[in-house]
């Protein structure tokens, strides 16, 4: 990869031969006879090329294209530049790297700007629908927030399952006399409780904090889009360019996460899947409220 920094534009050059063929390029430059003027490009290759300084010629894979005050161009690695041109080169390289990052970020953000309408439609499609993101978020809240129709004992057990990463619903009971006698015959200590698996609860990952659909689609994306749309990409400072470029680069991953969370939520939020949790509810906690909640999912 070869990139030239030409004013406000980044020019990508396909072949090293195109660099060597540029007017004024000298692949065997004597640094003692020239004063560094500036850095005009950078390159990175799988195969190594030789340094363009006559006193060095060390093969390297990454480096800079520089121009001298006399207009002669050559290529040097970062260590070569520091060794032969000192602090001037280090200062220029730092500024060049910053300028390159900023320009590349601006390019990405301008490209992203033209995709905003498509992105809005994708978010809208994920949120809408009979069992879309909005439905999943609204109907999953009672499973993690008290006072919304699901008894506390169920909420607490779900929290335990999320903490352990397990989806197996179990209950405990006292051992029968036969189970106690069998343990003694086998030379084992009689069990104090028997743990029995009731069911596997599918889709619990939809309730994990990183899969919060409102956070992903509304806060991170929709509110982020509104904030971004009023900004001028050309006037952004380096810190803003870095922030928004990272945000734009994370969008596809966030959409993928939202899609997976919706699928998990749809699997979770069915009466058949959640009905086994009713076994946890004592009479005084009002099991009928949980049944009413399950009916809303049908």
Image (tube, rainbow, N blue to C red):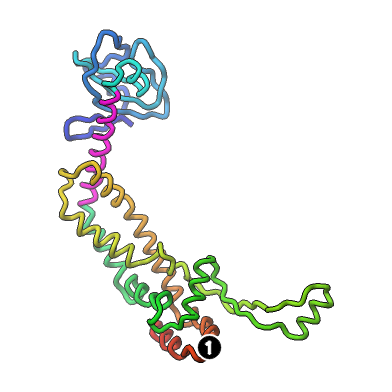
- In magenta stretch: residue 94: yes
Q: Residue furthest top?
A: 33
The x, y position of residue 206, in whole percent, is: 43, 68
Quadrant assignment for the N terminus: top left
Instruction: Report if residue 7 lies within the magenta region.
Output: no
Which is more toward the observer, 218 or 188? 188
Q: Nearer the viewer, residue 15 or 223?
A: 223
**154 relative to 125 in the view: left or right:** right
| Location of mark 1 (residue) | 282
Decide if residue 105 is in sight here. yes
**Secondary structure mostly taken by the magenta-highlighted segment of the chain:** helix
Position of the C terminus by quadrant: bottom left
Q: Is residue 99 left or right of residue 264?
A: left
Q: Position of residue 226 (x, y in %)?
A: 20, 59
Q: Residue at the spot x=35%, y=22% of the render?
A: 77
Q: Position of residue 78 (x, y in %)?
A: 35, 24
Residue 132 location in percent, x, y?
34, 72
In which quadrant of the rendered view does residue 72 lie? top left
The reply, left or right, for residue 133 in relation to residue 224 is right
Give SS at disc 1: loop
User: Which region shows up in magenta?
Assistant: 90-113
User: In the displayed structure, would residue 195 be above or below residue 234?
Assistant: below
């Amino acid at each position: 990869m070869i990139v030239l920094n030409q004013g406000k534009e980044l020019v990508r050059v396909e072949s090293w031969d195109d660099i060597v063929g540029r007017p004024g390029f000298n692949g065997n430059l004597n640094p003692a006879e020239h004063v560094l003027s500036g850095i005009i490009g950078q390159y990175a290759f799988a195969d190594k090329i030789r340094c363009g300084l006559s006193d060095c010629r060390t093969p390297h894979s990454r480096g800079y294209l520089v121009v001298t005050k006399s207009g002669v161009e050559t290529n040097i690695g970062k260590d070569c530049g520091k060794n032969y041109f000192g602090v001037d080169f280090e200062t220029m390289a730092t500024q060049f790297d910053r300028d390159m990052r900023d320009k590349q970020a601006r390019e990405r953000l301008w490209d992203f700007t033209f995709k905003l309408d498509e992105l809005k439609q994708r978010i809208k499609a994920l949120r809408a629908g009979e069992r879309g993101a909005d439905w999943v978020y609204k109907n999953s809240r009672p499973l993690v927030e008290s006072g919304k129709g699901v008894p506390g004992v169920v909420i607490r057990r779900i929290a335990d399952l999320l903490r352990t990463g397990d989806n197996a619903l179990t209950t405990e009971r006292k051992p029968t006399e036969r189970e106690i006698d069998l343990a003694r015959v086998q030379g084992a200590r009689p069990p104090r409780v028997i743990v029995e698996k009731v069911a596997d609860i599918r889709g619990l990952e939809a309730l994990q904090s990183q899969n919060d659909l409102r956070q992903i689609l509304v806060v991170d994306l929709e509110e982020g889009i509104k904030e971004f749309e009023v900004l001028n990409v050309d006037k952004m400072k380096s810190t803003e360019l870095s922030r928004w470029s990272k945000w734009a680069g994370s969008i596809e991953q966030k959409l993928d996460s939202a899609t997976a969370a919706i699928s998990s939520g749809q699997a979770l939020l069915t009466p058949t899947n959640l009905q086994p949790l009713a076994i946890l509810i004592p009479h005084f906690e009002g099991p009928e409220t949980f049944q009413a909640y399950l009916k809303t999912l049908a």
